[in-house]
Image (cartoon, helix red, strand yellow):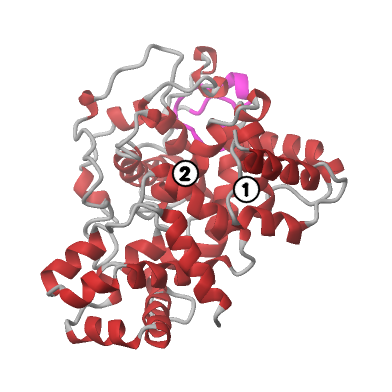
Amino acid sequence: MSSLHKSRIADFQDVLKEPSIALEKLRELSFSGIPCEGGLRCLCWKILLNYLPLERASWTSILAKQRELYAQFLREMIIQPGIAKANMGVSREDVTFEDHPLNPNPDSRWNTYFKDNEVLLQIDKDVRRLCPDISFFQRATDYPCLLILDPQNEFETLRKRVEQTTLKSQTVARNRSGVTNMSSPHKNSAPSSLNEYEVLPNGCEAHWEVVERILFIYAKLNPGIAYVQGMNEIVGPLYYTFATDPNSEWKEHAEADTFFCFTNLMAEIRDNFIKSLDDSQCGITYKMEKVYSTLKDKDVELYLKLQEQNIKPQFFAFRWLTLLLSQEFLLPDVIRIWDSLFADDNRFDFLLLVCCAMLMLIREQLLEGDFTVNMRLLQDYPITDVCQILQKAKELQDSK
């Protein structure tokens, strides 16, 4: 470890040990990348995403309260009508004349259960192919959810619920208009069949099952948006970061901590996932156009070339912006980009500058290429040095 890196770690530790965290100082340090040693990144992300307050003294009580709240969500929302839940203090609910599997009443718990299955099937399809270039999400977690996997309480896992449902997957497709491929061409394809995954022994669960549960709970708590394809790519890097925390005490609660950080992050970017807002000032179309207007200010020649070839930002920037670049780079590089995004107090303005920098860094290829060549460049971005991209974006920010 270099002396410079040791010095950076010490700088972070100095800021984080203060009774009241100096947020601006933490942002300044984090913007240049957060060391992963000692769980520093996990802790900084929780502060930057407003999960932990700046007052250290309240951390223990807030974490205990939030983790218990998440356990309550699991108790209330991962349910199966007709199954005894005596251990959870809920009386047995048999099929009755008033409530039965064919009851069309919106208040029917059976009706709710089947509607939830539609959302669950889409989530399941997406989380099983999360980050296929690494094996992490297919491996067993060291901390399976004992609340659900304890056979005495008779809860069924979401995985079993998916396996038992007979709904057709095509009835639950929720792809956004114009986005038929949310994965980058350089990513490997995941196994297409449920049977192609290694079956874990009873009492174990894979990391993707934990992510599935987080997304399902989020969809239940946020029915206005529920689940939209691509949310899995937002929660994945968050969960990976927390689930690989070297501090086992924090790592054990990666699921609950990820849920609340994901919820806070989605509160800032959820408009990107709501189609009815696409053309509003807070919608994704406005942000894509902002990338081009920024490019026009910074490099009018390149802007005119893309306009001449009728290369619209929808063709590539939709995915860049909606998924916070999580599909354009390998996971460690995505995490490094997110350090800077989370640290910037106008972080999603900075994301626009990152996208603009990505265009300007391949300007020579774009100026020489035809439509087909340029589309290939933009949909399978060639530069892998994210520090170069972030440096260029910072230059654009400073030149405003």
Q: Split into 4 quadrants, where in the image is the N terminus?
A: top right
Whether residue 152 sits left or right of residue 380 in the image: it is: right
Q: Against 396, is 56 above or below?
A: above
What stretch of residues is rendered in magenta?
74-93
Residue displayed at 68% across by 25% down: 249
Q: Split into 4 quadrants, where in the image is the C terminus?
A: bottom right
Q: Main secondary structure of the magenta part?
A: loop
In the rendered image, is residue 264 in sight?
yes
Tell me the kind of residue under disc 1: Trp
Residue displayed at 42% across by 87% down: 297
Does 84 lie within the magenta span?
Answer: yes
Residue displayed at 36% across by 50% down: 329
Q: Residue furthest front?
A: 3
Tell me the kind of residue under disc 2: Pro
Residue 152 picture location, percent across and down:
53, 12
Disc 2 packing (10 Å; few <14; some 14–19; many ≥20): many
Does 151 lie within the magenta span?
Answer: no
Q: Residue tagged by mark 1?
A: 45
Q: Against 176, is 150 above or below?
A: above
Residue 148 picture location, percent across and down:
52, 23
In the rendered image, is residue 95 in sight?
no
Q: Residue tagged by mark 2?
A: 237
Q: Against 152, is 360 above or below?
A: below
Lower sequence index among marks 2 and 1: 1
Helix, strand or loop at label 1? It is: helix
Whether residue 224 sits left or right of residue 302 in the image: it is: right
Residue closer to the observer: 246 or 190: 246
Q: Against 268, is 194 above or below?
A: above
Residue closer to the observer: 124 or 191: 191
Marks 2/1 in contact by CB < 8 Å: the verdict is no
Residue displayed at 47% across by 72% down: 353
